[in-house]
Amino acid sequence: MGRHSCCYKQKLRKGLWSPEEDEKLLRHVTKHGHGCWSSVPKQAGLERCGKSCRLRWINYLRPDLKRGTFSQQEENLIIELHAILGNRWSQIAAQLPGRTDNEIKNLWNSSLKKKLRQKGIDLITHKPLSEVENVENKIRDQKKVPKELSNELNLMNSESSKSDGASSIATKGYATEIEGSTSSKIMMKNCSSKDFFLDKFMSSNHENYTNLIGNYPIHMSYASSIDQTLPTNSNSSHWCSQSGKSFDMNSEFISNSINVMSIIPPTTTTSFLPTSFCYKPSLPVPSDDISTPSFAANGSYYWEAATSNNSKSSNRSNGSKDLTSNNNSFMESQVEEAKWYEYLHNPMLMLSSVQNQSSESLCSEIKAETYLVPDTSGAVLPHSKQQQQPSQSTNIFSKDMHKLTAAFGHIE
DNA sequence: AAAACTGACAACCGCAGGACG
DNA sequence: ACGTCCTGCGGTTGTCAGTTT
């Protein structure tokens, strides 16, 4: 591994962290907070660069981290989230309290990818590979698509075939230039359908979204047990079935005091142009859309907002507000929703909009961010590699605490 | 027993974007 | 508008322990 330029200049240490370094960093951050990371190493007496310290803290020393292997529920959730969010590891991690983006990324790359491949699931669309091919063929056959766009699609497809995983989805449409007839160039930033949808969803419904996540049950219908239920050559009806198992809310998630997160319904995971979704109050949207590929499931989805008044959720986002306390916001979001429904279900409209540059503002709307207030369990983690078994997180925490206490003594 | 392989994890790199002067 | 600093993110690679040959 190379060395940070800053590390090189200052001949700073790199590589694995020693327990002593961990102790220094832990003590410093616990006592003073990190403030400006670049100043942390000096203040903490470490020969590391601030970036390295930050990473170590975030990925290992942070007290709210949950250690141990991922439960089946967590894995399934990651798969579902990945289908929606792609390689947006930080956003996925935000839905899994106590897990870091690095952890999740590693899990995906080392384990989940293989599982999906073995099941014949496309890593980009999370649909059976056979269907992906069909859809791509359909897209190619779209004679109505303008020549310029057609070229772009071809380009995208070739790009897609090169890369592995959903990152290619995220890449599709990014910074794609369309040469208009007027020679003006329109930057389609973040305008792949998927990102288009995501950005819209995350931003226009941000307030509601942040309230929903973590507290409200959701109809999770697919891949609730991907290992057990999915045949290798599962067809679309199986994969996208609405009648799938519901998420087990009495799972280890709950017992571990983790906010079970809800997320976009499964059809959104299976289509570039997601079908409708709603949040409470229910906003059913017609499902007989004309553009959604045949594998898209019928029916609408409803975000069932619980009445739970969880302070964590209200703290999750700076701007989060109670669902019932902002009728204007809600009405606006409904209008927006209808508007987006049109967009999302009519690619040509979307294209037209892009060409009119009217969607540029939409595309460039705020990037989705969700904030999770860590579960302040107070657990702190030891340096040694973990060798924990599943469903032992409680023990893990107490063991870690013991180890830490033994290693570092009392931490203020 | 030792080399080769594998999986999981940790850490680094480079880039993007925001804040600030 | 520009440059600098800082932070965050995703991709990539190094390390290590366990397993297989």
Image (cartoon, coloured by chain):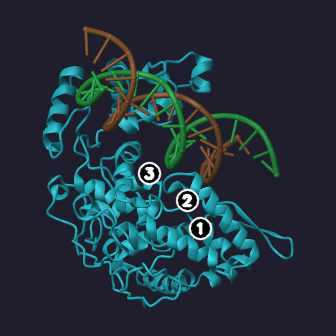
Chain colours: A cyan, B brown, C green
Drawn side of residue A188 relative to residue A342, left or right: right
Same subunit, labels 1 and 3: the answer reads: yes
Circle 2 residue: A170
Q: Nearer the viewer, mark 1 or mark 3?
A: 1
Query: Can residue A321 be spotted in the picture?
Result: no
Circle 3 residue: A90
Observer-nearest of B14 and C4: B14
Drawn side of residue A171 relative to residue A387, left or right: right
Cβ–Cβ under 8 Å for marks 2 and 1: yes
Label 3 neighbour load within 10 Å: few <14, some 14-19, many 20+:
some
Between the C-alphas of marks 1 and 3, the distance is 20 Å
Q: Going 27% across and 74% down the picture, which residue do you hit?
A: A219
Q: Going 15% across and 28% down the picture, which residue do you hit?
A: A402
Q: Is residue A380 above or below residue C17?
A: below
Secondary structure of the residue carrying tag 2 is: helix
Please identify the residue farthest to the right as the structure is shown.
A182
Q: Going 86% across and 75% down the picture, which residue do you hit?
A: A182
Secondary structure of the residue carrying tag 3 is: helix
Q: Earlier in the sequence, mark 2 or mark 1?
A: 2
Residue A12, image x, y percentages:
53, 18
- Which amino acid is tagged 3? Ser
Cβ–Cβ under 8 Å for marks 1 and 3: no
Same subunit, labels 2 and 1: the answer reads: yes
Observer-nearest of A175 and A223: A223
Q: How many marks?
A: 3
Secondary structure of the residue carrying tag 1 is: loop
Which quarter of the figure is the C terminus of chain A placed in?
A: top left
Residue C11, image x, y percentages:
54, 44
- Which amino acid is tagged 2? Ala
Q: Going 60% across and 20% down the picture, which residue do you hit?
A: A8
Q: Which chain's residue wears label 2?
A: A
Label 2 neighbour load within 10 Å: few <14, some 14-19, many 20+:
many
